[in-house]
Image (cartoon, rainbow, N blue to C red):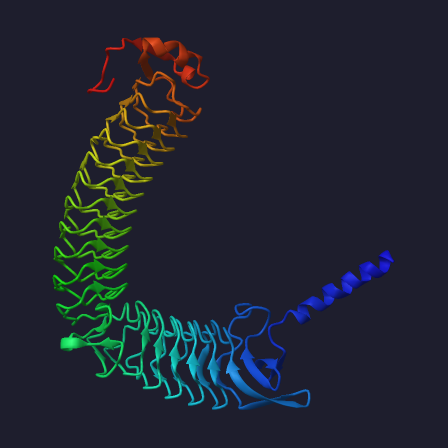
Amino acid sequence: MKHLYKFSLLLLALLLPATALSHDFEVDGIYYNINGNEATVTYKGTYSSQYSDEYSGSVTIPTTVTYGGITYSVTSIGNSAFFGCSGLTSIDIPNSVTFIGGSAFKGCTGLTRVIIPNSVTSICDSAFYDCTSLTSIDIPNSVTTIGNWAFWGCRGLTSIDIPNSVTVIGESAFRGCRGLTSIDIPNSVFSIGNEVFSGCDNLTSIVVASGNPNYDSRNNCNAIIETATNTLIAGCMNTVIPNSVASIGEGVFSGCTGLTSIDIPNSVISIGDAAFHDCTGLTSIDLPNSVNSIGDAAFSYCRGLTSVTIPNSVTSIGSHAFCCCSGLTSIDISNSVISIGNYAFSYCSGLTNIDIPNSVTSIGDGAFSDITSLFSVTIGNSVTTIGKNAFERCYGLTSINIPNSVTAIGDRAFESCYGLTSIDIPNSVTSIGSYAFYDCRNLTSVTIGKSVTSIGNYAFKRCLNLTEIYSFALVPPTLFSVSFGSHFFSTLHVYDIALEAYEADPYWSNFANIIGMPSTFEVDGTK
């Protein structure tokens, strides 16, 4: 019985490679799957990228295909059927095909022209994604849906005619189509996704047909506005935002490098995520007092911006909002701002001074990281949390005043701040994160407030010049053997009444020189 069982397993192993193949059969170099009496064009092998360029040159898909004495009607081009076939230069799609699947021609960088027959009703997600050589595409009147990312990165396309049959244009459908200069949206379209024309940096004209029930281009604004919500959802370098617009949507001008200036009217209350992301030609922006929120990555990589004033109406600055704005030399944050998002100003290498107002309660992770020219920071008295990596690699920072409102300093918050020579951690702080001051190589003294209960791994490791540590906590904070690295040669100062507890602690006792101090002793107001 055991031998029969082992033989069955061996037989199954031998059969698996054949049964696991994606295609059911192959005829004249084209691979198919069977669904009843219909055939779908697919890829060779078990997954779409198993073979490179299984289709190349010019391919003609037949209307019918015969295999094993049975004739099948070819009705579909399946998901990922021609995925990554960079050698494919042209494709002839027959009238029998009604469906073009997701990622069907994704990465076919050699494909230059496609004629879609009148039988096709849907172009699915990523169907022609990154077909960089595609210069011409004919979309017939039968198509009702253009999927998400359908023509993303087709930078060779110079024009696109969207027929009156189309009702849905998916998210980022034409993103990165840099050759497009004008777009007309028919009145049949009732749904348009976010960032539909992001990165179309040569686009100068956008017009929605009059009579469209959901969208308009009022006042010849060269943009698409969602009528019911007054939200701008697509724009170009020539857009003029009407006074009736309430919101600038997600990715509206993303990658629009030709945009050099834009007037935001007082009607606008919110700026969406990535709204002006990578608008490298934008040199100035005036945010009106009506704006109350700036979305994630709203102005990230706007390297031409030199100064920004956050108006009194704004309460939150989103994550990465101004990340990598390397030309930014000044930022004025108003007293209305409560939170500064993660990496909001990271890599703004031109900033030298930052004043964080008293209204701010939290500084997000990495909010000001990698600002190498930053030498001065003022943190307002309402901040309770300094996030992870908040000021990491701010090499020029020479001093930092941590206010009494702060209760937690996150991991790597001040890592590699080479310019810091001393740090006072106030009595309000209860925890110091791992690597918080790691590699602050010029730090000579540290004052630890009385409420600190834990100091994380490597918190002060590689602080090569640290010689004086003052701890005002009566109970020795939880410490790890590597919290101070190998710098137990530093002098540790503790209260006389706590001296015995520190000397008995398995980690604090590693300091070679522990000195008691009277209860009246204080350092810069800390005791």
Task: Specify the quadrant that holds the N terminus.
Answer: bottom right
446 is higher (above) or lower (below) than 16:
above
Residue depicted at 26% across the width and 25% down the height: 426
| Residue 394 vertical position relative to residue 42 in the rendered view, above or below | above
* Left or right placement of residue 277 versus residue 239 in this view: right
Residue 205, above or below 417: below
Question: Residue at the location (22% across, 72% down)?
Answer: 225
Please tell me which residue lies in front, 305 or 164. 164
What percent of the width, then of the height, locates residue 117? 43, 89
* Residue 28 visible in the snapshot: no
- Which percent across, then down, holds residue 41? 54, 80
Q: Quadrant of residue 406?
A: top left
- The picture quadrant where one finds residue 300 is bottom left
Residue 433 x, y percent position in the rendering? 36, 33
Q: Residue furthest right?
A: 1
Q: Residue at x 42, y 15 (%)?
A: 509
